[in-house]
Image (tube, grey):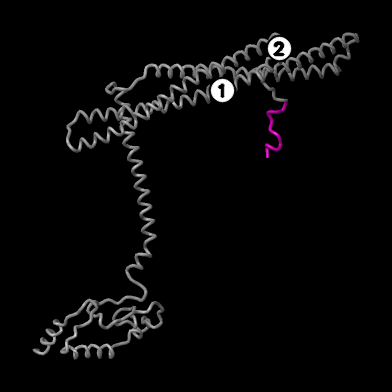
Amino acid sequence: MTDSIMSKAATMEIPINSNGDTGSLPEDDSLEQDLQQVMVSGPNLNETSIVSGGYGGTAEGIIPTSSIKGPGIRYNPTMLGTRRVLPLGQGPNMHQSLSSPAVTADEVNRGVAVEKFDIVKKWGINTYKCTKQMISERFGRGSRTVDLELEAQIDVLRDTKRKYENILRLARALTNHFYSMVQTQRALGDTFSDLSQKSPELQTISSYECVCDVQDEFGYNAETQKLLCKNGETLLGAINFFVSSINTLVNKTMEDTLMTVKMYENARLEFDAYRADLEELNMGPRDAVTLTRIDTAQQQFQIHKDKYERLRSDVTIKLKFLEENKVKVMHKQLLLFHNAISAYFAGNQQQLEQTLKQFNVKLKPPGADKPSWLEEQ
């Protein structure tokens, strides 16, 4: 019993350096020799087996380690103090290098998610402030920025657009009805022409002169209807040009200006919302947290103020250009419409054609509305 205690005490006093090597003490040579002898007489690492069935398993669950191919194992008997056995060519740095692409992808995905969250957060805050400002204005509790001159011009533009849309609707209805009349005149002229060529039901009349007179009348009416049909097609070209120009003015030029007006109104609402927020913060206490919030609110207010003033300037310029363009376009189109209608119903074919030449209106040849066989492919 005493001998075992003494051997344990001697073992506990063995100094071990960072590499697991023992100190150079002469009295420990016997202990080192005993350790080497144990390692020599112990089992060979290349001949050990792994029992998959646990303790007391059958021989079928035994896998010889000599059949497993893999990196060699460095075994140093002097490293018993640190208990480290590492495969050759592997270490902590190699595991980190293998997992670095996955870590990079995770960081990228996390950054994208954070960016989207920030966008949604800003949108939510902005929507909340604008909704609050809108409700306050509706119930008369909040103040709004008003440019009386600009607001009056915008109201005039919207009223003018509604009236021009009514003109466009009526002009299209006139085009459809007149087109139907021209088609009816063409069909009637073809029928009169056919009857002027051959009238078997009139052959029973005894007087040959009456038959010839009726056939001549059919011919005259056929020529009249064809002439009216030709003039009607010319007038249709003038009306279609009028409709196209009004449609461009209403649904493109005016609509573009109204889109800028809508952006201006949204910017005005945001400007008033952040202005009210800043005024509310200035009326509160002035502690450190509130001062930080006031600085942030001041920056946001200045950003939306610049946006509001820029869009207000854009709306003013567009309204001015729109008014000039509207006057020019409507003067030309109304003059064309008046001259074409007057010439048609006066029966002045020459004046009608001269009107179209004056305003550079080109008529489409018959069958131009139908696409060619190349366009249909």
Give above or below for 217 relative to 31: above
Looking at the image, the residue that sits furthest to the left is 2
Examine the structure image and report whether residue 371 is included in the region drawn in magenta: yes
Q: Which mark is residue 225?
A: none
Q: Nearer the viewer, residue 201 or 336?
A: 336
- Disc 2 crowd, CA 10 A, few/some/many (<14, 14-19, 20+): some
Q: Residue at x 13, y 82 (%)?
A: 13
Hey, what amino acid is under mark 2? Gln
Q: Are the two marked residues, 2 and 1, in contact with CB atoms closer than 8 angstroms?
A: no
Q: Which mark is residue 247?
A: 1
Q: Nearer the viewer, residue 129 or 212?
A: 129
Q: Nearer the viewer, residue 278 or 57?
A: 278
Q: Position of residue 16 (x, y in %)?
A: 19, 79
In the image: residue 189, left or right of residue 285 = right
Give above or below for 270 relative to 222: below
Q: Quadrant of residue 119?
A: top left
Q: Quadrant of residue 343?
A: top right
Q: Position of residue 185 (x, y in %)?
A: 72, 17
Q: Residue at x 81, y 12 (%)?
A: 220
Magenta region:
366-377
In the image: residue 352, left or right of residue 44 = right
Q: Which residue is mark 2?
A: 351
Q: Position of residue 44 (x, y in %)?
A: 32, 87
Q: CA distance from mark 2 to mark 1?
A: 26 Å
